[in-house]
Image: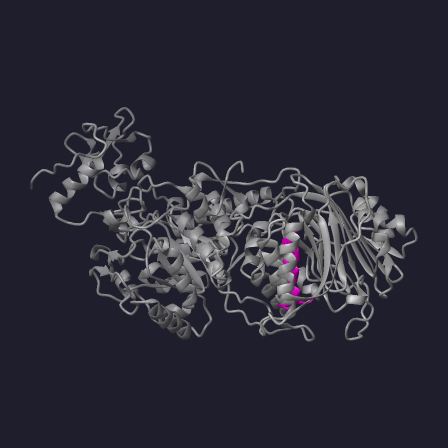
Amino acid sequence: MKDTANHYNPYGDDKVIAACSIFGMMDTSGRRFSGVDITKAIANMHDRGNGLGGGFGVYGIYPEHADHYALHIMYEDKLTQRDVEDFLRDNFHVAFAEEVPTRRAAAIKSPPIVWRYFVYPNSRRPADRSNDDYVVELVMKINTGFRDACVFSSGRNMGVFKGVGYPEEISEYFRLEEYEGYLWTAHGRFPTNSKGWWGGAHPFSILDWTVVHNGEISSYGINRRFLEMFGYICTMHTDTEVVAYAVDLLLRRHGLPIEAAAKVMAPPLWSHIDRLPDNEQALYKSLRQVYSSLLLNGPFTIIVAHEGEMIGLTDRIRLRPLTAGVKGDVLYLSSEESAIRLICPDLDKTWTPMGGEPIIGRLKTNKEGKAVTIEECAVA
Amino acid sequence: MLKTYLPARFIVERNASRCIQCQVCVRQCGFDVHYYDEEDDEVRARDERCVACHRCVVFCPTNALTIRKNPLDYRENFNWRGEAIEDIIKQSETGGILLTGMGNDKSYPIYWDKLVLNASQVTNPSIDPLREPMELRTYLGRRPDKVEVDWETGKLNTRLTPLVPLEVPVMFSAISYGAISLNVHESLARAASEAGTLWNTGEGGLHKKLYKYGSNTIVQVASGRFGVHPGYLDAARVVEIKIGQGAKPGIGGHLPGEKVSAEVAATRMIPMGTDALSPAPHHDIYSIEDLSQLIYALKEATNYTKPVSVKIAAVHNAAAIASGIVRAGADIVAIDGIRGATGAAPKIIRDNVGIPIELALASVDQRLREEGIRNQASVVVAGGIRNSADVVKAIALGADAVYIGTAALISIGCHVCQACYTGRCSWGIATTDSYLAKRINPDIASHRLVNLLRAWSHEIKEMLGGMGVNALESLRGNRLHLRGVGLTDTELEILGVRMAGS
């Protein structure tokens, strides 16, 4: 029996309320591009943040280590680093490790030590556990078991870069113009009661799932307690973390398609479900009945990404902004249209999605080589 | 007969300049307090019989009546207060167990009053329920861990066990026919049907006249098995096994033979005028595996079409018991706290056995979560819920819904005089005397009950909107929306709630 009540954080009041800017761009043809444009776009929404957190998620950046889990870990001191590295060597085969290259940036004060490790589960993985589950479990162990160490990125062929500062400063510090990916997300943060912790910046990530989030999740208390039943322990001092875990639970572990997961997090009203045809009604009803504790309530816009897919979603009454834009193969999602226009003045189209309606971008050929389109809404 | 040593508890004051000797009070009093002295042409009172139910006060056309507490001052003594002295006098005169009615009236802490709610300011917007949708719908029953769908065909592979919708998370508590009149049962049934919630038959069976409200009815199966037969189970939406009751944990129900009228006897399937005494335990349940057998026997009998609830009194190890109940196959766990009411219970038990529902609820919800089985059953709580804020706090602590009994009876006239066990209820509620029972008109009473639920729904929506959520499920178990005031660290820890200001 898990003793979640005696966890170091018995009241679960880690929620940090924040307002933010978010931006996502994806080339659905799979073409990779640098972090220059997205840095420019997110910087254009400078005033939506207050310099207490910025970050980026990039997909397709480590093709040379595509089979390995890329762990990005921040440390407060060398001693912790040594302990964690011992732990890594005990539990993983470590193919390659290096300090994440940075450049001195005037605005970045007292940064932590940030390293990355390309790892693969070793023979310690129990036979009944998948590689992914094993990695999740060990990431949780490091984040709860080692003081002053935080694994903030753990997916394959992707990476999260984040810290305390404006997003454009974080981009400069981590030299993001030198990376190339086919999908980028970015976040500028305006926390109202943060202690300026690097791990608290967005995106939040587990395996290759990343979430950037603008809003306050008023249902955090129950979302978190529900996820605890499935082994997720919230450690990041922010409500966004529950979105990442909810997405991991619904999509990876329970096998729901993203459209259905969106309908769990922002479900249609009961009065709407009651009017649907029988088979759809049964589906939506079941989703809402079983996952009622994962309804994300309160104002939010999120951009969730994982390998080959980017999803934008607002709460069901759209209390936070989201604008979508398309130019050729590229899908843009942003808090403000101006940020999209700045880097792509001649969009094919731009629109404001309805509350609770997911905007989904997929690589044009997915793993099975099946063609899919940029924008597919809802299961129905 | 020896004169009782018991002083009158209340004094009936009649304003002579207002009284018109109309004798309404004489006819209204179920306890024969008022009488008319023909010789003097004057209405008088036998104060010692008054229970302060206020029926005469409310119905006096000239507002001539006042009931006062008898200001009898015993010599000051913190240990030997009036109640302790009078209980001994009563027992010395009768040699029996003291009976009482309604819920525990002692000064145990009421934790609802030490919990305060949150509201949105600036960082997230509050939601206005008059302008935006606000959802209270709740489903009771067992849920699987996940939904499985064949996404190619859109076919649901997960078949959910029956779930029962409530449009407002407030149900009417189990009160048996016999303890209350048929008119009250009908009022509850009609109100539940109109408001989209459930009422509970209690352990006295379901009168034939009320089968048509079956889809809003919870039928109870208690240790006495009164009125239990296939038609009874088939009529219901939910079947509830009554193990215990908050007012009298550890003992069975008592219905004195005086209340067993022909209709009550027919419904309970017992001879008229016999005492209907439920055994303390179910004699086929001496352990948790026996409970599991009864749960599945009822599911088999109803062809798995109805959730099965198990109701227990909140006792010291409620959390472990609830866990066992869920693992035994129950779809709903109902917990009745120390302030839960009764039609008749030994006073000594009502006042001393059990634990406050707030603490039981918090520990049950937490325990079921720690074991990863919270979604396998709904949790319903009962026992002293007074208003919509109590409901909201219960849901934030982790309840799926609440039962109200006393509150429902108050809405149709009850003044909580605690004399239900006498069967002489002047309000026509806790009686089967036809002269008294016809005072409840189901048309009016059901309307009052629906009004109460409607008022509470509006208030719940306002509170939810203030917290910035527009669906009740986002508050359920969300203890971050609660803060404690005036509680010790241990109390806060058990409630899983932080101190206000932190």
Tell me if I can see residue A276 in this picture. Answer: no
Q: In the visual, does B59 lie left or right of A48?
A: left
Residue drawn at the location 29% of the way across and 51% of the way down = B343
Q: Quadrant of the N terminus of chain B?
A: top left
Tell me if I can see residue B144 in this picture. Answer: yes
In the current view of this chain or complex, which residue is farthest to the top? B17
User: How many marks on residues?
Assistant: 0
Q: Nearer the viewer, residue B108 or A152?
A: A152
Was residue A298 drawn as part of the magenta stretch in this picture?
no
In the current view of this chain or complex, which residue is farthest to the left? B1
Q: Nearer the viewer, residue A57 or B385?
A: A57
In the rendered image, residue B287, in percent from the top left (x then y), is placed at 32, 67
In the rendered image, residue A53, in percent from the top left (x then y), is placed at 73, 44
- Here the colouring is one colour
Quarter of the figure with residue B309: bottom left
In the rendered image, residue B292, in percent from the top left (x then y), is placed at 38, 70
Magenta residues, dominant SS class: helix
Residue drawn at the location 39% of the way across and 49% of the way down = B357
Was residue A247 drawn as part of the magenta stretch in this picture?
yes
Q: In the visual, does B218 lie left or right of B90?
A: right
In the current view of this chain or complex, which residue is farthest to the right? A346
Q: In the visual, does B488 lie left or right of B226?
A: right
Tell me which segment is drawn in magenta. Answer: A240-257
Q: Is residue A367 positioned above or below A36 on the image?
A: below
Q: Is residue A168 positioned above or below A226 on the image?
A: above
Residue drawn at the location 65% of the way across and 46% of the way down = A216
Q: In the visual, does A91 lie left or right of B501?
A: right
In the rendered image, residue B352, in percent from the top left (x then y), is placed at 28, 47
Q: Is residue B266 positioned above or below B360 on the image?
A: below
Q: Quadrant of the C terminus of chain B?
A: top right
